[in-house]
Image: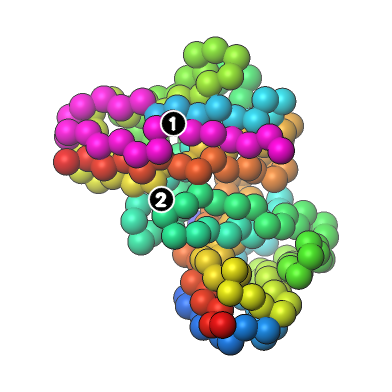
C-alpha cells in the first residue's frame, strides 16, 4: 500500500531563509508527484507537478525535485517571505492521488 | 484563468439527511474527482469520473455516495444518508485529458453533520 510521509510536520523560520520540505513515498511506481499549498480553511493550490520521468521542476522561487528510485521529493523555497506561510502538501499519483499530511510552514517577519 | 468552482461553500445538515455538493469543473477538462479532508487529517481520494462513468473509487466511496454529471457543466456528489463522520471539507478537482496531468482543485465545501 502506498504511504506518503512529509517531514517536518511544522517549520518556523525567519523571513529570507531558504528552506527544504521533504516528501517520501513507499512505492516508486508513480505517474507523477504534485506539490500543493493549502491556506487555513481554504482550498488546494497546485504549485508544481513532476512527472515520473523528470528530476526537477521550477516555478519562480520554488524548485521541486524527484528521486523516484529512493522514493523522495523535496520542495525548495528560496528567499522565503511571510506570504509563503501555509501548509504544503505533496501527493503522489499512484492510480489516484495519495496525500501526505503536510508541512505547516510559518515565515516570521 | 479558468477555475473549478464549488457550491455551497458551507453546508450544515442533520444526521440521516441527504446532501448534494456541486462542482463546476474547468470547461474543457475530461476527468473529474472528489476528495475529502476530515479536520486535522490527510486529504483522501473518493472517486474519479470520466465519460459519464466512475473510473475509479476508493473504499470510502460506499453505497451512500454517488456522483453524477447532470448536464454539460455540473458534477455532483450526493451523500444519501449523512453520518456524523461525513463531516469534512469536500474538494472537487478536474484534469484536462488524463489522470496523470495536473489536477486543479476547487475551494471546497465544508460539510458539518449534526
- Residue span colored magenta: B1-20
What is the x, y in percent for residue A24? 60, 70
Question: Would residue B54 be seen by someone viewing this image from the given angle?
Answer: no
The C terminus of chain A is located in which quarter? bottom right
Compared across the picture, whether A31 is left or right of A101 comes to right
Q: Is residue A62 left or right of B35 when viewed as pictured?
A: right
A69 sits to left or right of B78 = right
Residue furthest to the front in view is A109
Q: Residues within 10 Å of mark 2 (few under 14, many from 20)?
A: some
The residue positioned 78% from the left and 62% from the top of the image is A59
**Residue at horizontal 72%, vertical 43%?**
B101
> Residue B81, labelled with which disc?
none
Q: Residue beneath label 2, please?
A: B37
| Whether label 2 touches label 1, CB < 8 Å | no
Left or right, B82 with reference to A22: left
Q: Residue at x 50, y 29 (%)?
A: B23
Q: From the viewer's perspective, is residue B95 above or below residue A71?
A: above
The answer to whether residue B113 is above or below residue A25 is above
Closer to the chain start, of discs 2 and 1, is 1
Task: Provide the secondary structure element on which disc 1 rests.
Answer: strand
The residue tagged 1 is B7
Measure the C-alpha gap from mark 2 to mark 1. Answer: 16 Å
Q: What number of labels is visible?
A: 2
Q: Position of residue A40 (x, y in %)?
A: 44, 60
On whether disc 2 and disc 1 are found on a single subunit, the reply is yes
Q: Chain of mark 1?
A: B
Measuring from the top left, give residue B51's x and y in whole percent.
63, 19
Image vertical order of residue A14 relative to residue B29, above or below: below
Amino acid at each position: 500500500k502506498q504511504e506518503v510521509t512529509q517531514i517536518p510536520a511544522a517549520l518556523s523560520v525567519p523571513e529570507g531563509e531558504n528552506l527544504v520540505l521533504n516528501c517520501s513515498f513507499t512505492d516508486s511506481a508513480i505517474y507523477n508527484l504534485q506539490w500543493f499549498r493549502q491556506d487555513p480553511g481554504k482550498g488546494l493550490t497546485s504549485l508544481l507537478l513532476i512527472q515520473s520521468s523528470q528530476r526537477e521542476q521550477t516555478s519562480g522561487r520554488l524548485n521541486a525535485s524527484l528521486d523516484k528510485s529512493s522514493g523522495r521529493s523535496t520542495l525548495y523555497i528560496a528567499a522565503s517571505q511571510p506570504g509563503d506561510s501555509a501548509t504544503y502538501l505533496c501527493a503522489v499519483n499512484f492510480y489516484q492521488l495519495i496525500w501526505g499530511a503536510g508541512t505547516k510552514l510559518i515565515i516570521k517577519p | 484563468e479558468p477555475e473549478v468552482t464549488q457550491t455551497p461553500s458551507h453546508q450544515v445538515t442533520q444526521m440521516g439527511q441527504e446532501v448534494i455538493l456541486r462542482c463546476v469543473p474547468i470547461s474543457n477538462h475530461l476527468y473529474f474527482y472528489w476528495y475529502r479532508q476530515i479536520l486535522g487529517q490527510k486529504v483522501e481520494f473518493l472517486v474519479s469520473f470520466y465519460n459519464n462513468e466512475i473510473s475509479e473509487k476508493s473504499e470510502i466511496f460506499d453505497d451512500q455516495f454517488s456522483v453524477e454529471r447532470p448536464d454539460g457543466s455540473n458534477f455532483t456528489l450526493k451523500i444519501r444518508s449523512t453520518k456524523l463522520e461525513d463531516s469534512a471539507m469536500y474538494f472537487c478537482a478536474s484534469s484536462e485529458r488524463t489522470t496523470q496531468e495536473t489536477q486543479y482543485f476547487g475551494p471546497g465545501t465544508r460539510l458539518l453533520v449534526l
